[in-house]
Image (cartoon, rainbow, N blue to C red):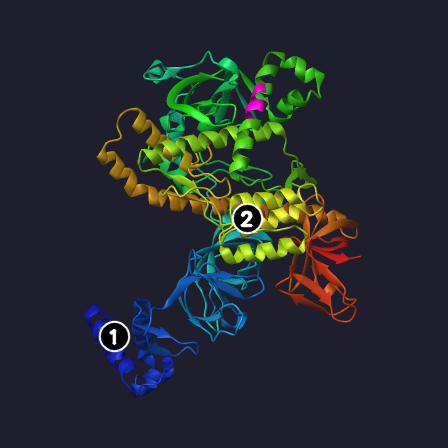
Amino acid sequence: MKKRQLERRKKLMMDVLSNAAYRPMRLRELAALLDIPRPKRKELYRVMDELVKSGSAQLNANGAYVRAEKPQIVGTFLAHPRGFGFVDLGEGEEDIYIPEEKTGRAMDQDKVQVALLEKESGRRREGVVVQVLEHKCKEIVGTYQKSPHYGFVVPDNPKFSQDVFIPGGQSMGAAAGDKVVVILTSYGSRRKGPEGRIKEILGNVEEPGTDVLSIVKALGIPTEFSEKVIRQAKRVSEELIPGDFQGRKDIRDWTMVTIDGEDSKDLDDAVSLTWEEGENGEGVLYHLGVHIADVANYVQGGSAMDREALRRGTSVYLTDRVIPMLHQRLSNGICSLNAGEDRLALSCLMDVDGQGQVIRHEIAETVIRVDRRMTYTNVQKILDGSDPEVCREYADLQTLFKKMDELSACVRRQRQKRGSIDFNFPESKITIDETGKPLAVEVYEHNRAMELIEDFMILANETVAREFCEDEIPFLYRTHGDPDPDKVEELLTLIHSQGIAVQKAKEKISPLEIQRILAQAKGQPNEALISRLALRAMQQARYTVECTGHFGLASTHYCHFTSPIRRYPDLQIHRIIKDKLRGRMNQEKKDVYASILDEVATLSSSAERRAEEAEREVEKLKKAEYMLDHVGEEFEGVISGVTGWGLYVELPNTIEGLVHIRALEDDYYKFDEETLTLTGEAAGKTYALGQRVRVRAVDVDLCQRNIDFAIE
């Protein structure tokens, strides 16, 4: 249909919809009204589709066309494995619940138009998907099932509920049981399911590593570097050359160390510390140096390496592999602050008083040489004196680490004084063998050495952010907004039910008030649960171009400066810092940064969410795989979640499973949404958050990564 003809027909249909005698009609009824024969109804559908997309017309809850009297409601459909879904309307807007029978074949992440249903008093908004405006899902990952002349792919993602038909000749020779990547060629209709063609074979489900690779591919995380990126990485020198020293502060004679995990290879931060006693009993003045690998010296803006780093956004750390943001030749080589090697750095040099406050600072391009590569484990042994052999090996650094610990305590006290929140719940440590099979799932223990580095990095991030905010230079900030008031009220109600006294001085809750709540729970059996409940009420931190502060840290200025090897925002702001230091930050340069930073912030925030989801899903998979060998065994646990479909129980080693409501066979249990409890109708027995229970592992579903428990 030609453009002019299309416009004429659109005008004609708008005249029909605007007629006072018109009543809402479906497409078939409109075709009959206008006497349009069957072969030409596709043209009518296109006209009506264009009117809906432009906002001139819309579909009502019955699928009939009406003139758009008010702006159409458009959002992102978020599917749930149980069939229903939600439409996300964006930040600050309440989402819309979509019952299973009203999803209109929308798929997870689709852009959809929604019609609101009549709202029942006291209940959340419900709606019906009346139009899929844009399919976001272009590829899926799943398991191939082969027939003689065609095949099907069963999606791994439980939110994608339909199998994908693979016509003959479109399978790339995949065998039954292969994990594959499928390009969707058709999204199907009411009578026909989706179709696709296989793009990549990842390996058989039984092959080691295929399970994790399937999760990575399903989330669209890049795993291979292009030839152009590899060539650029190979051209980077493995050693410093004389020209690298020009214009830099040479501090190679300073004593400095890296402190990381035993398995870390990309060492992007080092610390140094000297101190002097103040005059007239004024206390100690600390000279803290946080030295960060100068990755921007090797990754030029707009280069193939830079574009690939932006596409990846962050390194992804999984149980059996690391998917790096930068090519390993840089991340493990010239950009890694390896002990005994000359390296280029951006250093944040801070004078910190005995109250943990920065009183002066300088940001400088430097040349450094790390003296020792330390681990969290060994530094902790030095701090607590638990291993005489380690203490002897690092005898020359003992005083340094003791002073670092002393300064760290000052900095942490200052942060806590203003209200910084420390969420205290266990993280998982999963040990695997060479095939990826999980051997143990344990709680990852944090120690003072980790806190020490965390304190110094936060201090440097705040110091850098404050300088550039005050100078009004375009920049990338790490921001964390105030919690949603409704979620806070729900949180306070739940915490009160856990026996914790709660107070809120004003309409908005402050970080200090949340900190006090967590302090009351410290050492209690439900401490981890209270921390998780508080975290769920928080907004997600993200990258922005506005310096709006960080609620969780109770910080007015915050950015990510300390990890340019593994986070793109850090690399981006290093370029801004270097332009300022070298006197290149003119108005033209400011305009350039102002034009690109919004997109960098959006892409980086999105990449971070993607990485977090991959890490979470791989962890769930490995925990489920671990529990396969423990089906039938009994465990003590704590109820960590209560829903209409059952109880979630967390074991001491962080593994969580579901006691389905069908498994509560002793009574008929009713769910109370306000108190998050399940109560037996006959006997009155109640299951509530934080309650200790004994469970038995009864089933494991590796495909869904679910663990089923039964109450003992």
Which mark, by number, is residue 606?
Answer: none
Left or right of 274 in this view: 446:
right
Q: Residue 164 at x, y = what percent?
A: 51, 62
State the residue position of label 1. 10
Which residue: 26% across, 25% down?
583
Q: Residue 256 at x, y = what percent?
A: 51, 17
Disc 2 crowd rating (10 Å Cα; few below 14, some 14-19, many 20+) is: many
Left or right of 679 in this view: 38:
left
Which corner quadrant holds the C terminus?
A: bottom right
- Amino acid type at image mark 2: Ile
Q: CA distance from mark 2 to mark 1?
A: 44 Å
Quick check: is 275 in the magenta stretch?
no
**Residue, far front:** 280
* Vertical side of 355 occupied by 478: above or below: below
* Vertical side of 35 occupied by 670: above or below: above
Q: Is residue 653 visible?
A: yes
Q: Nearer the viewer, residue 316 or 498?
A: 498
Q: Is residue 300 visible?
A: no
For the magenta stretch, what is the residue range? 403-408
- First in sequence: mark 2 or mark 1? 1
Disc 1 crowd rating (10 Å Cα; few below 14, some 14-19, many 20+) is: many
Left or right of 206 in this view: 636:
right
Q: Residue 457 at x, y = what percent?
A: 49, 30
- Amino acid type at image mark 1: Lys
Which corner quadrant holds the N terminus?
A: bottom left
Q: Nearer the viewer, residue 99 or 494?
A: 494
Callout in the foreground (2, 1): 1
Task: Say whether marks 2 and 1 touch (CB < 8 Å).
Answer: no
Q: Nearer the viewer, residue 125 or 16?
A: 125
